[in-house]
Structure formats: structure tokens, C-alpha cells
Amino acid sequence: MVQAADAASWHSTVPGAGRAAGGENKMGNRFNGALQALAGGAAALLLALPAHADTWTNYGGNWSHNGTTHTVDSGLGNKAVQAGTSYQSSTMEADISLGANGDAGFIFHASNLATGTDAYSGYYVGLNTQKNTVVLGRANNNWTQMIAYPYTVNPNTSYHLKLVTAGKRIEVFVNNVQVLSAADDTYLAGSAGLRVMGTNATFSNVSITDNGTQAVPKWDFSSVKGAVYTPTNAVNYIEWWQSYDSAIVDRELAYAQTYGINTVAIYLHYLLWENDKAGLLNKLENFLQIANRRGMKVSPIFFDDCWGTNGDGSIRQPALGAQGAPVPGVHNSRWVQSPGRAIKSVYPGSYKAQIRQYVQDVVNAHLNDNRIIFWEQLNEAGCTGDLPDQSRDLMNDARIAIKDTGTAIPVGSPTVQLSEPTYFSDFFSFHPYGGDYPGPYGANVLNSESMNRGSQSVPGIVTNYGGRGTGYIMWELGIGRTNTRFPWGSPQGAAEPTTPFHGIVYPDGHPWQVADVVALNGSQANMAVFGVTYFNGNFGSQIKTSITPLIDFDLNTERGTASPDASAGVSETNYSVRWTGTVRPTSSETFTVYADSDNIARVWINNVQVINKTSAGRSTSQGNIALTANTNYPVTVEYVHGTGASNMHVTWSSASMARRALSVIAPAFAPASVRFGASNIAGNFIRHQNSRARIDPNVTPAADSQWRMVPGLADPLAVSFESINYPGQYLRHRNGEVWKDANDGTDLFKADATWRPRVGWADPSNISFESYNFPGNFMRHRNSLLYSEPILNSSPALDKSDATFVIN
């Protein structure tokens, strides 16, 4: 190897060496500049492969080595390797002329060399006249093709082949235009040389620049807790971007933020860019602003090979315009591929320039935007088994387009149906859908799509990936019009599933299971949410209890998504909902509360009814209430839906606060203690005396009548009452009587000590408490003692009054 001082004289005397970079694209210039910077600015070592045959080791074939020109006859894997050298990062160049029906090129990072077709460990890149391709692959006494990219290679014609490696990066140029961009870390260093397969060849002006040892970048994805995002009101991503609604995006990302999601993956589409580039870029920027405000990173996905098949198995063609309603029962029934088969089938012969421009327009707008966590070229290459070669070409070209911008944001496509995506990725990502939650695991890999309730669960994903320091992105955030609540292969017309296959959150913000979001966020006590209860009829049969961050939703009249929760059995018509929570204003003033609904809506704050909308039809009612800063106030909201589309939006405003969605504080910030007064005997409060619960006036000590209201011991959506002066002791029922007893940790105690807040039997501005494990039984006083007894609509007025309390 020559010294750096000799490089200049060698460089100036060898014909063709050190070709001017002016004819290369920006990628070559930037990449070589980056190599020099990584090398600490030191001059690269240039090596002219010497004239003496004894400095080469030949493995098969009749080689002639004359200066920088090397020839070989036809053979199966004939190799000539520069003796005694090893490179990790380098630039290798040659003018190559080869015969018909074969290929010729470079081997690099090679070791374990022997005579034979694939008798080495390392890489090969070459020109193929038989198939008209530039081929890149990996050998280890066998052959793994990474890509064979279409390129016309005429026999007995000289082509300038240039290879640049840096760490795991592999960049290939032909005639000063980049053709391939790959990444692989199987072999990070080794010998360099020449190789032919099935043809004779001449290699002229052969040179190598040793660029030293470059770092292999690694990215830490261990903190990623993500979900794929398509708004619940869209059947696919074309419909989403065409009818982009920032209010819906902000609302649904607020749900995600509350529940602990910190990353969202989103799909873009080539046709949207082709039709309205400026519009797409503006919408993407707006989305990034909202996501950033909600504390989320974003992974844009440029292309997709899924799902997009018609009922007869043919590939559905994407098109702009109306996307159609969801097909009942069918999983992902309106999803489409990008860019679509019509374009892919003629790629890269056509559309190559347009595809490059589309990708670069997006990336150039966000070169080193820290709101973006990584760029994904193509989702699930080969998903349908259609046009896999074009999928590889598309990933390769998108990678070149992205890297050519100079962005420092990593690039990655998941390895799923095809193995090749890993070769075009800066990091390894995968889509594990198996019930055993397969790996690999670790901070430097990413589970970029998983979670199906056929074999997995959200808590299972959190435990098996997050618990092993592996980031994850789940399909998908919303349970909506994409129809992925139905399982793969579900037939048209299938009944609504009782367990949604995919999805975490319904359009109104409540999760399928509270356990899902508790697993994500760690504790419900840290979530600013309403407790919500769903009924069929006008507060008739209770169907489900859950939580939600907001009261802010619109539901359509389509099967399945007309119901707030079809899986639970909530009706699409004639249902009702009750929300409870605590608001804490930051200023002392009069607040205006609004209820925009299609039917009956009622709002109470601090047990004062602020809104009582009794009319059917979409309209907004409002009311005023004076509140004091930094004071906690209970809030109850009720909504009754009849028929048609559902709309319910509760907002508030004041002189100092712009109108916004009514939001509550987290239970962790609930009052330190409360007292519960009998609604029909003024001045009497629930207290304990000799452990028996009762009501009395003038309680001494006052702490005997003070309680800490905490998430229910048996159900965090309900409540339990812990004694202030006897911590660890709670109000519980036993044998129909209510006592203050110590928590013994049993399931029975937890259930006995858990109560569901209900609108007061005697006065809807007050509150009643229903037994958790004896539904229909309510806490009530009789002769000053507290009991748990049945209270019905037909119960006497006195019983209802005795079961109604005032929070103080």
C-alpha cells in the first residue's frame, strides 16, 4: 500500500484514475465528502493496483495483470484478489468491458477465498450482459442475491463501475450515475478484487481509495411506543389526505398522547403528490406540527405493497376521488397500494424520474427535521407476491433519492414477505405477528408493525417488546372505517367481532380495553380522562364502562362504526352515554359551557346543571357558571342518541380562555379529601364510628368524616373511599351493612370496597354510589346507619333520597 505522500504523483500519472466528480450526481459528492469528514480530514490513501502478477492472488481462470489493466478468460467465478490487503471503507473504480452471457465486477470485504464459483465470504457487484442488470449479492460458499437492477449492458462496451463503501453502506455507480444503494453488516471488512462469471472481461484503470475505518451508525429505538395512524373516519390514506381535517387529527392524537403513544407511522401516496404536490406537503407539515405538539415522532411511509386486492384476487388499482364505503365484514376493505400496479409494472423503465422527485420533495422539506424518526421507503415489499423485482427496484431508488438529499434521518423498510428490504435499510425492522412474540430484540432493531388479537394483545406487545428494550409500532391506533377490527380473511357480511382484531381506540376516544392503555401508560391515575358508561336505550341496560380523554366525536350511520362500540354490543341507535370527571380551572371567572349534539345533552359542574338540551336535531346549547381558580369541581355529562348520525362535542370558554374541548384532570390530582353529606338531612355527613359507617352532624374529630376518593380497588373506573385518619381502611359492605375495614388484599374485600358513581337518585345534580359486586344495590342511610341495599326506579322517594349524597 503506497503512502499518502505518494498518492498525488500516482494519481496524476495513471490514466483514468481519480475521475472528476463533476459528472456524478450529488449523492456521490456528498457521500465522498462525508467519508473524508469521517476520516478526520486526513488525506485518503490511494492505491494503484500494481503491475506485477505476484502481487495478485488468482482463484481460477487465466489472468493477465499489466499495470492497471487486468484481463481474464471466461470461467465460473474466476477471481483475482489484491494480496495482503483489507479494507473497511473504500472507493473502488474500473472501466470494464465484458463479453456476452455473463457478468464481471468487484468482490469486496472478502475472506476465506478459494477456487470455485462462490468460494469466498464477502460481496460482489458487477455488470451482467446476459440479463442486462447491475447485480449485487453476498457469498459464503453459496450465493445470496441482494438486487439485480435493470441496466442495459452491451457486450464489448466499456462501462465505468464505481463502488463506495463506508461501514455497512454500499453505493454503486455506473458511468458516474448512482445505480444501487444498499446497507449490510454481514461482512464489514476484507480483501478487494475482481471477478467474472460466465464471460471474459477486461478491467482497465483499476484503482482503490482506502477511506480508513468508518463508524457503523446505530439508532436507539428502545423508547418507541407507536401506532400506525389513519383517522377513524377514513377508509384508507388516499381518502384521509384528500379530505384532511386537522381537528380530527388533533383530537385523535390527543387520545394517543393521553394513552402513552409517542410515535405514529403514516402513509403517503404518490398519486396525491402527482395531483397536488403543494397541498400534500402543506398537509404533511400541519400533521407534523400537531404530532409535535402532542409529543410524538412521525415515520412517513412512501410506498406500500399491501393490501389492495379485489374479491377475485386481482390487485386493486389506486385512484383519486371517492374511495367507497367500507365493505361490511372485510378486513382493510378499501386499502390500496402505492404507487399502484399500473406504475410498478412499468418501473423503472417509466416513472423513475417522477418517483425520485416525489420522494425528494417530501424529504427536502424535512431534511433533518427532528419530528421525523425515520423514513420508510416501502411497506411489506412483496406482500401480495406481485412484481417483487419492481419492489426491490423501488426500495433501492427511494433509498438513493433519500440519501442524495443529505438527510441524516435513517432509512428503513421492514423485512416481512421478502428478505431484501434489510439490504436497503440503515437498521433492521420487522413485523412480528406470531403469538410467541418473536424477536430479534434490542434497542437497535424496531418492531415496526404488530398486534393482532388473534394471537397477541396490547399488554403482550408492551411486555414482550417494550419489556425487552425493543421499540414497537402497533397496527393501528383507531378502530374505525379501515375495517381492521375484522380479522384477515374475514368474509363479506361477517358479524361484528366481539374482539377487534386490530386497533386500540374508538372514534370517541375510549379504548377497547382499559388494560390496553394502562399497559402503555403505566397507570390510569396519570391519565386525564373521564369515566364513561354506555347504555342501550335511555340509560337502560348498562353495556360497558371505560375512559376517554374528551367528549368530542362524530359517528356515521355505517354498519359497525355507527355504534360507539359495536364489539361490546352498544346499539347504533337509541343509546346513551354518561361521563364523569373533575375539572380544575386555572382562573377565577365565569365560564361558558357548550354542548353541540344531535339530540339530548346535559351537563353538570359542581352539581349545578349548566346545560339541559332536550330537543332532537343538531344544535348547540350553552350555559354559564362561575368557577374559582385551582379548585376541583366534579363534572357529569349525559348524552342520549336517537337515530341518524351521532354528534357530541362539549367545549368551554371564558374571557381569558379561547373555546376548547372540555378536559378533566388526572385522578392523581383529585382532591386530597372529600366529605359526603346526606342530601335530605342538611349538615349530616358520612363518618365512621367504632368502624361502623353512619351519618352524623357536627362530627368530632372532623377527620372521621373525611375520605380520600381513589380509583376503585376492584375496578379503576369506579371509586373506593379511604379513611383519612385510618390509611389503608376503606368503606366496604358486608352482610348489607357498610363498615370501615382494613384492606386485607383479598378479591372479595376489593370488590366490597368498590363503588360506581351514579347520578343522584333524588337529584341529578348530586350523586349516588352503586355497589360494584352487587349491581342495583346502593349505599344509603337509614336511622343514621349506612347500608348497601337495592334501589329501583319504583323505590319510594324516601329511599331514593336516603341513597343520594352531596360532595363537599
Image (cartoon, rainbow, N blue to C red):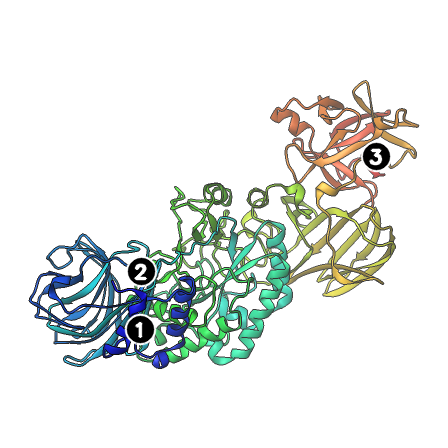
Assess disc 3: are there few (<14), some (14-19) or many (≥20) residues with their C-alpha within 10 Å of its C-alpha.
many
The amino acid beneath tag 1 is Ala
Residue farthest to the front, as pictured: 5
How packed mark 2 is, by other alpha carbons closer than 10 Å (few <14, some 14-19, many 20 or more), is many
The amino acid on which the numbered mark 2 sits, given as a three-letter code, is Glu
Q: Nearer the viewer, mark 3 or mark 1?
A: 1
Pinpoint residue 18: horizontal percent, then vertical percent: 30, 75
Relative placement, left or right, of 362 versus 605 is: left
In this rendering, the answer to whether 32 lies above or below 221 is below
CA gap, disc 1 and disc 2: 40 Å
Q: Earlier in the sequence, mark 1 or mark 2?
A: 1
Q: Secondary structure at mark 2?
A: helix
Please state which amino acid type lies under the numbered disc 3: Arg
- The answer to whether the residues at label 2 and label 3 have Cβ atoms under 8 Å apart is no
The residue beneath circle 3 is: 675
Front in this rendered view, residue 150 or 624: 150
Q: Is residue 174 visible?
A: no
Q: Is residue 252 left or right of residue 375?
A: right
Q: Which of the two marks, 1 or 2, is nearer to us in this view?
A: 1
Which residue in the structure is indicated by mark 2? 420
- The residue closer to the viewer here, 264 or 78, is 78
Seen in the image, is 768 located left or right of residue 682? left
Residue 44 picture quarter: bottom left
Q: In which quadrant will I find the N terminus?
A: bottom left
Q: CA distance from mark 2 to mark 3?
A: 65 Å
Quadrant placement of the C terminus:
top right
